[in-house]
Image: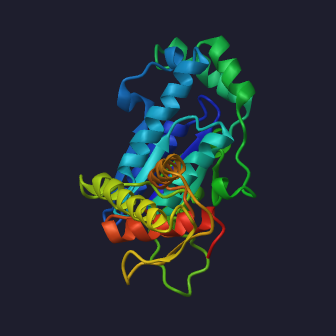
Amino acid sequence: MALVVICGQPCSGKSTAALCLSEALNDLESKPNVRIIDETSFHLDRNQTYAEMTSEKNLRGVLRSEVDRSLSKDNIIIVDSLNSIKGYRYELWCLARAAGIRHCVLFTDVEETHCRKWNTERREKDESSYNDGIFEDLVRRFERPDRRNRWDSPLFELWPFKDGIEKSSPAIVDLVSYVTKKVDSKTRDVKILQPTIATQSVRFSEANSLYEMDRATQEVTSAIIEAQSLAMGGPVTGLSISHDLPTINISRSVGLPELRRLRKTFIKLTGQSSLSGPPPPSDADSAKRMFIDYLNREFGSE
């Protein structure tokens, strides 16, 4: 259904906002499936995690992978973490687009001085808090969300120090409406992201998909080599493997090493979902069609 990215300075009330949002969603009559993904889910210590860039990067990777596995059109996923780097928020937005669901950002806007005070109070109460050096580093590197960026939009803002955080807070009420509102062709105030070949994850449904891809491209390669042999090494034009497939048009002689290289590149590109054209194939004929189209483009033919 939706991906909600919670963003804010350290100790700005993000986890409280996540819980209030989850409660507000669970109060709905429709009872949507709601899950919060946060650092504590993986039993990670925040000071150890943010002590070094390597461990911080690993944390983002773990959270991103868990979000990717959890997204569906039946769930509302709330990512409760700093999410302070705009490039990382963009990556999460891409995951939402690949899943074809709604996406929004909930920003807990608190001044640094108040966040610093709350962090100190938590430490005095022996609650989860940041070391001073780590806190100051995170504050310095924080990149505020900007609603003009597509990955930060729509942006819902909370002001915890001034207004507190309740499940009835206007921003949470508006967000709940946004992620659960029924849409039709006339709806203009809710955007459901549409997947593209560049962001769509490749999830083949059957274990033999790669085998089909490998076998299909090998058959095309073998047909080209055989046709060139019959043509005494000359160009291959109008070669038809099947009446259901495009013809192969190669205006010059192509050696087996070059064909193998192109075949390897095609399989790699398709596996990464970065090849322009139809979605990755799940059957032999589709794989052959895409590979022939790819070869014709590589050799400058229609």
Depth order, front residue of 273/233: 233
Residue visible at 31% across and 57% down in the picture: 215
For this orientation, the residue located farthest to the bottom is: 186
For this orientation, the residue located farthest to the front is: 232
Task: Name the quadrant of the N terminus.
Answer: bottom left
Depth order, front residue of 15/275: 275
Picture colour scheme: rainbow
Residue visible at 72% across and 38% down in the picture: 143
Estimate the x, y position of residue 55 in percent, counting from the top left: 52, 20
Estimate the x, y position of residue 202 in percent, counting from the top left: 41, 54
Task: Name the quadrant of the C terminus.
Answer: bottom right
Residue visible at 62% across and 48% down in the picture: 90
Where 206 sits versus 159, above or below?
below
Depth order, front residue of 226/173: 226
Q: Is residue 37 left or right of residue 54?
A: left
Where 203 sits versus 291, above or below?
above
The answer to whether residue 193 is seen in the rendering is no
Estimate the x, y position of residue 271 in percent, counting from the top left: 44, 51
In the rendered image, which quarter is residue 111 located in? top right
Where 186 sits versus 71, above or below?
below
Depth order, front residue of 21/247: 247
The answer to whether residue 300 is seen in the rendering is yes
Where 49 sits versus 209, above or below?
above
Number of numbered discs on residues? 0
Residue visible at 53% across and 12% down in the picture: 124
